[in-house]
Image: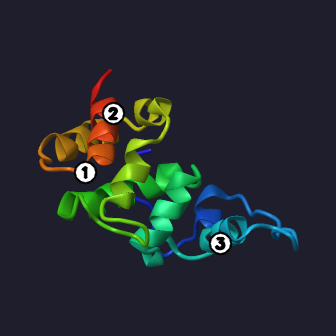
Amino acid sequence: MTRPPNCDRSLEELERDRWPAPSADATRLVATAHALRRRPVGELTVKDMRLLIGQDVGLPYLLPLALKVLRDNPMAEGDMYEGDLLSAVLTRNPAVWAKSSGLGPELRAIVSELTDLPPDLQQKVERFLTP
């Protein structure tokens, strides 16, 4: 799960799983997630990754990319608030980190150096760091 994906390929290609088109009455979130799965992962923005990771879509491929962003800018912002990508990453099911060998320790290293976080994000960091 820690191998970086081929950034020229979409999640649909990487996962070898093409989702059917969303229904006509699908929510904007569902329609957006479907569309983003067809875009090459190298073209996904912080906002796109935050949305997909928050929905547990493509985690084996997106978490390594997200951590690459977070290494350079832990408070990277999509479209919601400063640190929204970090928030999405921190709140994934703990089992995800158990499957991802090196990613959990890497995220621990990133967040253990952060200071002066907003209270909500600080709580998420503390929950992640507590076994």
Query: Mark 2 sits on what residue?
Result: 128
Q: Quadrant of residue 39?
A: bottom right
Looking at the rendered structure, the kind of residue marked 3 is: Thr
Looking at the rendered structure, the kind of residue marked 1 is: Pro
Calculate the distance from the C-alpha at mark 3 to the C-alpha at mark 2.
28 Å
Query: Mark 3 sits on what residue?
Result: 32
Circle 1: is it few (<14), some (14-19), or many (20+) Cα within 10 Å?
Answer: few
Query: Mark 1 sits on what residue?
Result: 118
Q: Is residue 32 left or right of residue 49?
A: right
At 53% across and 75% down in the image, what residue appears? 40
Calculate the distance from the C-alpha at mark 3 to the C-alpha at mark 1.
28 Å
Given residues 15 and 115, the one toward you in this image is 115
Q: Of marks 2 and 1, which one's residue comes earlier in the chain? A: 1
Find residue 78 and report its horizontal and vertical position in percent. Answer: 40, 70
Given residues 130 and 64, the one toward you in this image is 130
Q: Is residue 110 left or right of residue 3?
A: left
Label 3–label 1 contact, CB within 8 A: no
